[in-house]
Amino acid sequence: MKFQVGDKVLVRHSNEEGEVVDIINDQMVMVEVKGVRFPAYSDQIEFPYFKRFTEKKVVPTTKPKPSIERIKPEPAGPRQISGLGNGIWLSFLPVFDKDVFEDDVVDYFKVYLVNQTPDHYDFDYWLRLGGATDMELSSTILPNGEFYLQNVPLEKLNDKARFDFDFSLSPAKAGKAEHFEVSHKIRAKQLFQKLEALRKRQEATFSDLLFDRYPDAPFKESKGTGLDLSKLQNAGFKIYDAKQARQHLEPARTVIDLHIEKLTDNWSRMNAGEMLDLQLRTFEKYYELALAHHQATLTVIHGVGTGRLREEIHELLSYKKDVKSFINQYLPAYGYGATEIYFK
Protein backbone atom coordinates (compact mmCIF):
# COMPACT_ATOMS: atom_id res chain seq x y z
CA MET A 1 0.00 0.00 0.00
CA LYS A 2 1.69 3.20 -1.21
CA PHE A 3 -0.86 5.55 0.40
CA GLN A 4 -1.11 6.54 4.05
CA VAL A 5 -3.70 8.39 6.11
CA GLY A 6 -3.29 12.11 5.50
CA ASP A 7 -1.91 11.79 1.95
CA LYS A 8 -3.23 14.28 -0.57
CA VAL A 9 -4.47 12.41 -3.65
CA LEU A 10 -6.06 13.04 -7.05
CA VAL A 11 -9.19 11.05 -7.98
CA ARG A 12 -8.62 10.03 -11.59
CA HIS A 13 -12.23 9.75 -12.83
CA SER A 14 -13.28 13.19 -11.53
CA ASN A 15 -9.88 14.95 -11.53
CA GLU A 16 -10.61 16.24 -7.99
CA GLU A 17 -8.11 16.45 -5.15
CA GLY A 18 -8.89 14.87 -1.80
CA GLU A 19 -7.28 13.27 1.24
CA VAL A 20 -6.86 9.70 2.44
CA VAL A 21 -8.72 9.42 5.77
CA ASP A 22 -8.60 5.67 6.36
CA ILE A 23 -6.96 2.46 5.09
CA ILE A 24 -9.60 -0.20 4.29
CA ASN A 25 -7.31 -3.02 3.13
CA ASP A 26 -4.27 -3.64 0.93
CA GLN A 27 -6.12 -2.46 -2.17
CA MET A 28 -8.62 0.15 -0.94
CA VAL A 29 -8.54 3.39 1.00
CA MET A 30 -11.22 5.81 2.20
CA VAL A 31 -10.96 9.20 0.44
CA GLU A 32 -12.61 12.48 1.44
CA VAL A 33 -13.35 15.05 -1.30
CA LYS A 34 -15.16 18.28 -0.38
CA GLY A 35 -16.62 16.69 2.75
CA VAL A 36 -17.83 13.52 0.98
CA ARG A 37 -16.18 10.23 1.93
CA PHE A 38 -16.06 7.22 -0.39
CA PRO A 39 -13.85 4.15 -0.89
CA ALA A 40 -11.39 3.99 -3.79
CA TYR A 41 -9.07 1.37 -5.14
CA SER A 42 -5.38 2.29 -5.25
CA ASP A 43 -5.39 2.34 -9.05
CA GLN A 44 -8.22 4.90 -9.06
CA ILE A 45 -6.16 7.56 -7.29
CA GLU A 46 -2.69 9.04 -7.60
CA PHE A 47 -0.54 11.70 -5.99
CA PRO A 48 -1.35 15.20 -7.33
CA TYR A 49 2.25 15.98 -8.21
CA PHE A 50 2.25 13.20 -10.83
CA LYS A 51 -0.32 15.21 -12.76
CA ARG A 52 1.45 18.52 -12.24
CA PHE A 53 4.72 17.24 -13.67
CA THR A 54 3.28 15.19 -16.54
CA GLU A 55 0.42 17.28 -17.93
CA LYS A 56 1.05 19.51 -20.90
CA LYS A 57 1.58 23.19 -20.20
CA VAL A 58 -1.19 25.22 -21.81
CA VAL A 59 -0.22 28.56 -23.26
CA PRO A 60 -2.88 31.12 -22.35
CA THR A 61 -4.69 32.68 -25.29
CA THR A 62 -6.71 35.82 -25.62
CA LYS A 63 -9.76 33.83 -26.64
CA PRO A 64 -12.29 34.05 -23.78
CA LYS A 65 -13.89 30.93 -22.38
CA PRO A 66 -17.39 30.44 -23.77
CA SER A 67 -19.93 31.76 -21.30
CA ILE A 68 -23.68 31.46 -21.07
CA GLU A 69 -25.47 33.88 -23.36
CA ARG A 70 -28.47 34.12 -25.61
CA ILE A 71 -27.61 32.78 -29.04
CA LYS A 72 -29.91 33.40 -31.99
CA PRO A 73 -31.09 30.24 -33.75
CA GLU A 74 -29.57 29.55 -37.14
CA PRO A 75 -31.89 29.40 -40.13
CA ALA A 76 -32.36 25.94 -41.57
CA GLY A 77 -29.41 25.21 -43.85
CA PRO A 78 -28.88 22.78 -46.67
CA ARG A 79 -27.78 19.97 -44.33
CA GLN A 80 -30.84 17.79 -43.78
CA ILE A 81 -31.18 14.86 -41.39
CA SER A 82 -33.55 12.15 -42.57
CA GLY A 83 -34.87 9.04 -40.89
CA LEU A 84 -35.46 10.61 -37.48
CA GLY A 85 -38.75 10.06 -35.69
CA ASN A 86 -40.73 12.55 -33.64
CA GLY A 87 -38.83 14.19 -30.78
CA ILE A 88 -35.74 16.17 -29.91
CA TRP A 89 -32.47 14.65 -31.13
CA LEU A 90 -28.76 15.25 -30.61
CA SER A 91 -26.96 14.75 -33.93
CA PHE A 92 -23.23 14.24 -34.56
CA LEU A 93 -21.53 14.93 -37.90
CA PRO A 94 -17.95 13.53 -37.92
CA VAL A 95 -15.35 15.63 -39.75
CA PHE A 96 -12.39 13.64 -41.07
CA ASP A 97 -8.70 14.39 -41.55
CA LYS A 98 -5.70 12.41 -42.81
CA ASP A 99 -3.24 10.74 -40.45
CA VAL A 100 0.47 10.12 -41.18
CA PHE A 101 -0.50 7.05 -43.24
CA GLU A 102 -2.99 9.08 -45.31
CA ASP A 103 -5.91 7.20 -43.76
CA ASP A 104 -9.16 8.97 -42.90
CA VAL A 105 -9.53 9.56 -39.17
CA VAL A 106 -12.16 11.53 -37.23
CA ASP A 107 -10.79 14.94 -36.21
CA TYR A 108 -13.87 16.42 -34.53
CA PHE A 109 -17.68 16.32 -34.50
CA LYS A 110 -20.13 19.05 -35.46
CA VAL A 111 -22.91 18.74 -32.86
CA TYR A 112 -26.47 19.75 -33.72
CA LEU A 113 -29.75 19.89 -31.82
CA VAL A 114 -32.59 18.68 -34.07
CA ASN A 115 -36.27 19.47 -33.40
CA GLN A 116 -38.57 16.95 -35.09
CA THR A 117 -41.72 18.36 -33.44
CA PRO A 118 -44.20 21.18 -34.20
CA ASP A 119 -43.25 22.95 -30.94
CA HIS A 120 -40.93 25.91 -30.34
CA TYR A 121 -38.44 25.42 -27.46
CA ASP A 122 -36.15 27.62 -25.40
CA PHE A 123 -33.18 25.72 -24.00
CA ASP A 124 -30.02 25.99 -21.91
CA TYR A 125 -27.11 23.78 -22.92
CA TRP A 126 -23.95 22.65 -21.13
CA LEU A 127 -21.11 20.39 -22.26
CA ARG A 128 -19.46 18.91 -19.15
CA LEU A 129 -16.09 17.20 -19.27
CA GLY A 130 -15.01 15.31 -16.16
CA GLY A 131 -17.56 17.25 -14.11
CA ALA A 132 -16.31 20.68 -15.29
CA THR A 133 -18.29 22.90 -17.66
CA ASP A 134 -16.52 23.23 -21.02
CA MET A 135 -19.26 25.06 -22.93
CA GLU A 136 -22.60 26.65 -22.10
CA LEU A 137 -25.19 28.66 -24.00
CA SER A 138 -28.87 29.55 -24.06
CA SER A 139 -30.98 29.82 -27.17
CA THR A 140 -34.16 28.69 -28.91
CA ILE A 141 -34.91 26.07 -31.55
CA LEU A 142 -37.71 26.43 -34.07
CA PRO A 143 -40.32 23.79 -34.93
CA ASN A 144 -38.94 21.17 -37.33
CA GLY A 145 -35.60 22.98 -37.26
CA GLU A 146 -32.05 22.36 -36.17
CA PHE A 147 -29.48 24.32 -34.16
CA TYR A 148 -25.69 24.08 -34.42
CA LEU A 149 -24.25 23.77 -30.90
CA GLN A 150 -20.47 23.45 -31.28
CA ASN A 151 -17.49 21.48 -32.58
CA VAL A 152 -16.21 18.83 -30.19
CA PRO A 153 -12.79 17.16 -30.76
CA LEU A 154 -12.84 13.38 -30.81
CA GLU A 155 -10.58 13.09 -27.76
CA LYS A 156 -13.13 15.00 -25.65
CA LEU A 157 -15.92 12.52 -26.34
CA ASN A 158 -14.72 10.00 -23.80
CA ASP A 159 -16.55 8.44 -20.87
CA LYS A 160 -16.53 11.75 -18.97
CA ALA A 161 -18.31 13.83 -21.64
CA ARG A 162 -21.94 14.70 -20.84
CA PHE A 163 -24.45 16.86 -22.73
CA ASP A 164 -26.96 18.55 -20.38
CA PHE A 165 -30.09 20.43 -21.49
CA ASP A 166 -32.95 22.28 -19.82
CA PHE A 167 -35.91 22.74 -22.20
CA SER A 168 -39.05 24.85 -21.90
CA LEU A 169 -41.91 25.42 -24.32
CA SER A 170 -42.12 28.86 -25.96
CA PRO A 171 -44.76 30.03 -25.34
CA ALA A 172 -45.64 27.99 -22.28
CA LYS A 173 -48.64 25.68 -22.62
CA ALA A 174 -51.29 24.97 -20.00
CA GLY A 175 -50.96 21.48 -18.60
CA LYS A 176 -47.30 21.14 -19.62
CA ALA A 177 -44.24 21.18 -17.35
CA GLU A 178 -42.48 24.51 -16.83
CA HIS A 179 -39.18 22.97 -17.88
CA PHE A 180 -37.66 19.57 -18.66
CA GLU A 181 -34.06 18.57 -17.84
CA VAL A 182 -32.34 16.01 -20.08
CA SER A 183 -28.82 14.59 -19.85
CA HIS A 184 -27.03 12.52 -22.49
CA LYS A 185 -23.74 10.70 -22.10
CA ILE A 186 -21.80 8.98 -24.88
CA ARG A 187 -19.45 6.20 -23.85
CA ALA A 188 -16.25 5.57 -25.79
CA LYS A 189 -17.13 2.03 -26.86
CA GLN A 190 -20.57 3.06 -28.07
CA LEU A 191 -19.06 6.01 -29.98
CA PHE A 192 -16.76 3.81 -32.04
CA GLN A 193 -19.59 1.33 -32.65
CA LYS A 194 -21.69 4.18 -34.05
CA LEU A 195 -18.81 5.33 -36.28
CA GLU A 196 -18.33 1.82 -37.62
CA ALA A 197 -22.08 1.60 -38.34
CA LEU A 198 -21.90 4.93 -40.23
CA ARG A 199 -19.06 3.61 -42.37
CA LYS A 200 -20.94 0.43 -43.27
CA ARG A 201 -24.17 2.30 -44.09
CA GLN A 202 -22.26 5.12 -45.82
CA GLU A 203 -24.19 7.74 -43.89
CA ALA A 204 -22.99 11.17 -42.76
CA THR A 205 -24.39 11.48 -39.23
CA PHE A 206 -25.66 9.54 -36.25
CA SER A 207 -28.31 10.86 -33.87
CA ASP A 208 -29.47 10.01 -30.35
CA LEU A 209 -32.98 10.72 -29.06
CA LEU A 210 -33.13 13.10 -26.08
CA PHE A 211 -36.91 12.78 -25.62
CA ASP A 212 -39.94 12.02 -27.79
CA ARG A 213 -42.60 13.73 -25.69
CA TYR A 214 -42.47 16.85 -23.56
CA PRO A 215 -43.88 15.97 -20.09
CA ASP A 216 -47.17 17.15 -18.65
CA ALA A 217 -47.19 19.43 -15.62
CA PRO A 218 -47.20 17.51 -12.34
CA PHE A 219 -50.06 18.13 -9.96
CA LYS A 220 -49.29 20.04 -6.77
CA GLU A 221 -50.36 18.85 -3.34
CA SER A 222 -51.52 21.27 -0.69
CA LYS A 223 -48.94 23.22 1.27
CA GLY A 224 -47.18 21.45 4.08
CA THR A 225 -46.98 17.99 2.47
CA GLY A 226 -43.41 18.53 1.31
CA LEU A 227 -43.92 15.97 -1.51
CA ASP A 228 -42.37 17.20 -4.78
CA LEU A 229 -43.57 14.90 -7.57
CA SER A 230 -42.07 16.80 -10.51
CA LYS A 231 -38.74 15.01 -10.07
CA LEU A 232 -40.53 11.67 -9.90
CA GLN A 233 -42.33 12.41 -13.15
CA ASN A 234 -39.08 13.31 -14.91
CA ALA A 235 -37.54 10.12 -13.50
CA GLY A 236 -40.19 7.96 -15.16
CA PHE A 237 -43.08 7.61 -12.71
CA LYS A 238 -46.66 8.12 -13.89
CA ILE A 239 -48.42 10.95 -12.07
CA TYR A 240 -52.14 10.68 -11.25
CA ASP A 241 -54.79 13.02 -9.91
CA ALA A 242 -53.88 14.42 -6.50
CA LYS A 243 -56.67 12.53 -4.73
CA GLN A 244 -55.36 9.24 -6.10
CA ALA A 245 -51.64 9.92 -6.05
CA ARG A 246 -50.67 8.12 -2.87
CA GLN A 247 -52.48 4.92 -3.78
CA HIS A 248 -50.61 4.75 -7.10
CA LEU A 249 -47.10 5.74 -5.98
CA GLU A 250 -44.73 2.87 -5.36
CA PRO A 251 -43.72 2.56 -1.71
CA ALA A 252 -40.30 3.83 -0.81
CA ARG A 253 -37.43 1.35 -0.70
CA THR A 254 -34.52 1.50 1.68
CA VAL A 255 -32.57 -1.01 -0.44
CA ILE A 256 -32.54 -1.31 -4.26
CA ASP A 257 -30.84 -4.16 -6.11
CA LEU A 258 -29.41 -3.13 -9.50
CA HIS A 259 -28.26 -6.57 -10.64
CA ILE A 260 -29.55 -6.70 -14.21
CA GLU A 261 -31.42 -9.99 -13.77
CA LYS A 262 -33.48 -8.26 -11.05
CA LEU A 263 -34.57 -5.51 -13.45
CA THR A 264 -35.56 -7.34 -16.64
CA ASP A 265 -36.18 -10.84 -17.97
CA ASN A 266 -34.64 -9.92 -21.34
CA TRP A 267 -31.19 -9.02 -20.04
CA SER A 268 -29.49 -11.79 -22.09
CA ARG A 269 -30.42 -9.92 -25.28
CA MET A 270 -28.96 -6.62 -24.09
CA ASN A 271 -25.43 -5.35 -24.68
CA ALA A 272 -23.32 -3.85 -21.88
CA GLY A 273 -24.32 -0.27 -22.71
CA GLU A 274 -28.05 -1.06 -22.65
CA MET A 275 -27.69 -2.87 -19.32
CA LEU A 276 -25.82 0.04 -17.75
CA ASP A 277 -28.40 2.54 -19.04
CA LEU A 278 -31.28 0.54 -17.51
CA GLN A 279 -29.41 0.19 -14.19
CA LEU A 280 -28.71 3.94 -13.98
CA ARG A 281 -32.30 4.89 -14.89
CA THR A 282 -33.57 2.54 -12.19
CA PHE A 283 -31.17 4.07 -9.67
CA GLU A 284 -32.40 7.60 -10.53
CA LYS A 285 -36.06 6.57 -10.10
CA TYR A 286 -35.61 5.14 -6.64
CA TYR A 287 -33.23 7.89 -5.60
CA GLU A 288 -35.94 10.49 -6.35
CA LEU A 289 -38.57 8.33 -4.64
CA ALA A 290 -36.41 8.16 -1.51
CA LEU A 291 -36.18 11.97 -1.49
CA ALA A 292 -39.93 12.36 -1.98
CA HIS A 293 -40.60 10.16 1.04
CA HIS A 294 -37.95 11.96 3.13
CA GLN A 295 -35.85 8.85 3.74
CA ALA A 296 -32.72 9.32 5.78
CA THR A 297 -30.72 6.66 3.92
CA LEU A 298 -30.77 4.50 0.80
CA THR A 299 -28.64 1.40 0.12
CA VAL A 300 -27.82 0.66 -3.53
CA ILE A 301 -26.66 -2.87 -4.39
CA HIS A 302 -24.45 -2.60 -7.47
CA GLY A 303 -22.24 -5.66 -7.05
CA VAL A 304 -18.47 -5.76 -7.41
CA GLY A 305 -17.75 -6.95 -10.97
CA THR A 306 -15.57 -4.54 -12.97
CA GLY A 307 -16.65 -1.60 -10.78
CA ARG A 308 -18.14 0.34 -13.72
CA LEU A 309 -21.66 0.62 -12.29
CA ARG A 310 -20.28 1.59 -8.87
CA GLU A 311 -18.12 4.34 -10.42
CA GLU A 312 -21.04 5.72 -12.45
CA ILE A 313 -23.26 5.88 -9.35
CA HIS A 314 -20.52 7.46 -7.24
CA GLU A 315 -19.94 10.10 -9.92
CA LEU A 316 -23.67 10.95 -9.99
CA LEU A 317 -23.80 11.15 -6.18
CA SER A 318 -20.83 13.52 -6.11
CA TYR A 319 -22.95 16.20 -7.83
CA LYS A 320 -26.31 15.69 -6.11
CA LYS A 321 -27.15 18.48 -3.69
CA ASP A 322 -29.36 16.34 -1.43
CA VAL A 323 -26.57 13.87 -0.58
CA LYS A 324 -24.84 14.40 2.74
CA SER A 325 -22.38 11.53 2.25
CA PHE A 326 -22.06 8.06 0.74
CA ILE A 327 -19.83 5.13 1.56
CA ASN A 328 -18.92 1.76 0.03
CA GLN A 329 -17.70 -0.01 3.14
CA TYR A 330 -17.81 -3.75 3.83
CA LEU A 331 -21.29 -5.00 4.78
CA PRO A 332 -21.90 -8.62 5.86
CA ALA A 333 -24.86 -9.02 3.48
CA TYR A 334 -23.26 -7.46 0.36
CA GLY A 335 -19.50 -7.31 0.94
CA TYR A 336 -18.17 -4.32 -1.02
CA GLY A 337 -21.02 -4.63 -3.52
CA ALA A 338 -23.28 -1.93 -2.04
CA THR A 339 -23.14 1.81 -1.38
CA GLU A 340 -24.94 3.48 1.52
CA ILE A 341 -26.31 6.98 0.81
CA TYR A 342 -27.09 9.46 3.59
CA PHE A 343 -29.38 12.39 2.78
CA LYS A 344 -29.26 15.89 4.23
Image: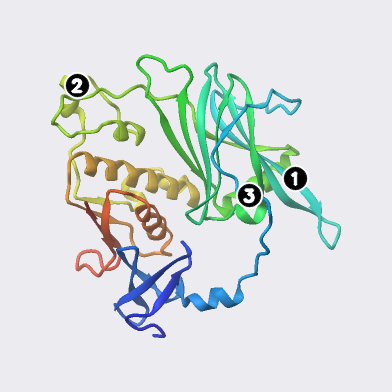
Work out whether residue 240 or residue 22 is closer to the camera in this orientation and state it.
22
- The residue that mark 1 highlights is 95
Furthest-top residue in view?
174
Q: Is residue 230 visible?
A: yes
Furthest-front residue in view?
62
Which residue is found at the position 75% from the left and 45% from the top? 95
User: Considering the numbered disc 1 on the image, is that residue within a helix, a strand or a loop?
Assistant: strand
For marks 3 and 1 on the same chain, the one whose residue lies earlier in the sequence: 3
- The residue that mark 3 highlights is 64
Q: Is residue 271 visible?
A: no
Q: Position of residue 281 (x, y in %)?
A: 38, 43
Work out whether residue 17 or residue 295 is closer to the camera in this orientation and state it.
17
- The residue that mark 2 highlights is 242
Which residue is found at the position 45% from the left and 37% from the top? 182
Q: Nearer the viewer, mark 3 or mark 1?
A: 3
User: Considering the numbered disc 3 on the image, is that residue within a helix, a strand or a loop?
Assistant: loop
User: Considering the numbered disc 2 on the image, is that residue within a helix, a strand or a loop?
Assistant: helix
Q: Position of residue 311 (x, y in %)?
A: 41, 60
> What separation in Å lies between label 2 and label 3 (alpha carbons)?
49 Å
Furthest-right residue in view?
102
For marks 1 and 2 on the same chain, the one whose residue lies earlier in the sequence: 1
Q: Nearer the viewer, mark 2 or mark 3?
A: 3
Dot label at residue 216 = none
The disc labelled 2 sits on which kind of residue?
Ala
Q: Quadrant of the N terminus?
A: bottom left
The disc labelled 1 sits on which kind of residue?
Val
> What separation in Å lies between label 1 and label 2 (alpha carbons)?
51 Å
Vertical placement of 312 versus 24: above or below? above
Crowd tier of the residue under label 1, counting other residues whose Cα lies within 10 Å: few below 14, some 14–19, many 20 or above: some
